[in-house]
Amino acid sequence: MTKETLTVTDNRTGRTYELPIMDGAIRAMDLRQIKVNDDDFGLMSYDPAFKNSASTKSTITYIDGDKGILHYRGYPIEQLAEKCTYLEVAYLIMYGELPTQEQLSKWENEITYHTLLHENIKQLFEAFRYDAHPMGMLISNIAALSTFYPEAKNVDDPEIREVQIKRLIAKMPTLAAMAYRFSMGFPINYPDNDLTYTGNFLNMMFKMVEPRYRPHPVLQRALDVLFILHADHEQNCGTNAMRSVGSSRVDPYSAMAAAAAALYGPLHGGANEQVLRMLTAIGSVKNIPAYVERVKAGEFRLMGFGHRVYKNYDPRATIIKEIADQVFQVTGRNPLLDIALELERIALEDDYFVGRKLYPNVDFYSGIIYQAMGLPVAMFPVMFAIPRTVGWLAQWVEMLVDKEQAIARPRQIYLGHGRREFLPIEQRG
Ligand code: ACO
């Protein structure tokens, strides 16, 4: 009969240990009993960048990186992207089930109710330099929101948590649009509560002097799909930051500022910005082979390619490619698309990329669509942070109510000096 255990023999001592296997994992703490003597701290596992360590159990998002599968709460991303609005999926991610019509209407109303920001936030924006990066402004203002809602620090009160969740989901598009309008020197647009979540976002971004902004239905729908695709992605760098910082029991605004800061990095949500800069730098299809050679020589990475988890085509990239066509019918074709398609074709035939299982990720095509919609490149990470808000919040709540979780605090392997005596400055060197 097979047993769900792992037998380990410590060759230093000859002792054998039997460790339980649960859900395909052993508990790192079970290794601590493995000691050479009573003074020994016990065995640890060493896993820089968490390449093979589960930090949590979760019921939110499922990824099979080898097969290119992504599910939210059990539903395939392809079905959700085709049939749902972003707020419907946000409800699913947050509460675990798709909403009934009644639940959805209530949820939409509640989110709409919270879209306005305190007027002082405008002054915070005005304190930035005229050319401030919108993501820097967004991160700062997410953190600033904690000062407007001091009750948010009661993270163990489910009712207080609920209000902050709705506030954050509602206010992120308003903050994002403000960052854009400020960086363009345009007057701020207030929310129009008759519009949908994504329609209102387009309104706050692009309304100029017309009395009423009417979002283009194709662009509004494309934005819904893009937001659905970016809503959660299990334990990535930003989500890990949300959980890790949130584990100190800080308020969700402060924890989410940390998550957004993690997302900003060029290896994470900032990659969509880097992709656009890369495609612009390549400039023409004829320059691609030389560019790919430089990537292979290790000069730089092909941005928008590769993923820690996906070792197959990122399913989100497939869906994004489809909606790109619909958007381009409205906006006109982005000429960078030809460079992107040819770059993908060449890379997917090249042994360097094939051998390392490097495929286009979600960021490879999203920037091309956002640019066609009229968004400046610096806004791309902001466009990622808006929909990821719900993922961060769902993961944050899951962490807070998980009795096994505690303040996140990894161990280290100390390789520095042993104890040594202090030297007065004149005796050094
Ligand atoms: N271009 C060229 N080579 C690459 C790339 C790339 N984009 N990505 C990985 N490689 C190579 C590495 O050099 C390494 O090669 P080696 O074995 O010869 O040393 C091998 O592939 C494995 O790469 P790792 O860095 O070990 O993979 P890891 O899982 O740590 O990194 C990451 C994943 C950060 C996404 C990486 O693929 C990358 O830097 N991609 C470009 C940035 C990007 O698009 N990020 C967005 C990811 S999606 C998201 O965050 C929303």
Image (cartoon, rainbow, N blue to C red):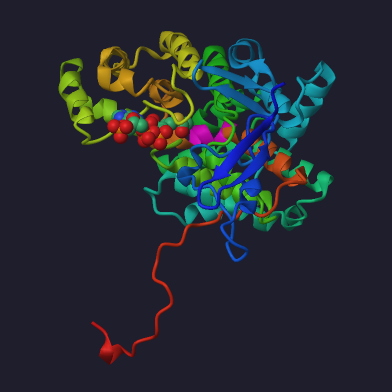
In depth, the one of 187 and 184 nearer the eye is 184
Q: Position of residue 62 (x, y in %)?
A: 62, 24
In depth, the one of 422 and 260 nearer the eye is 422
Q: Position of residue 398 (x, y in %)?
A: 72, 39
* Range of magenta residues: 382-387
In depth, the one of 414 and 335 nearer the eye is 414
Quarter where residue 93 is shown: top right
Which quadrant does the C terminus fall into?
Answer: bottom left
Would you say residue 123 sits in the magenta stretch? no
Q: Is residue 383 visible?
A: yes
Q: Is residue 115 visible?
A: no
Q: Residue at x 32, y 20 (%)?
A: 355
Secondary structure that dominates the magenta span: helix
Residue 422 position (above or below residue 223): below
Q: Residue at x 39, y 50 (%)?
A: 130
Which quadrant does the N terminus fall into?
Answer: top right
State ligand 1's quadrant.
top left
In the displayed orientation, state which residue is furthest to the front: 14
Quarter where residue 100 is shown: top right
Q: Position of residue 337 (x, y in %)?
A: 32, 16
Q: Residue at x 57, y 42 (%)?
A: 9
Quarter where residue 56 is shown: top right
**Left or right of 407 in this view: 64:** left
In depth, the one of 138 and 245 nearer the eye is 245
Q: Position of residue 260 (x, y in %)?
A: 53, 44
Residue 405 position (above or below residue 368): below
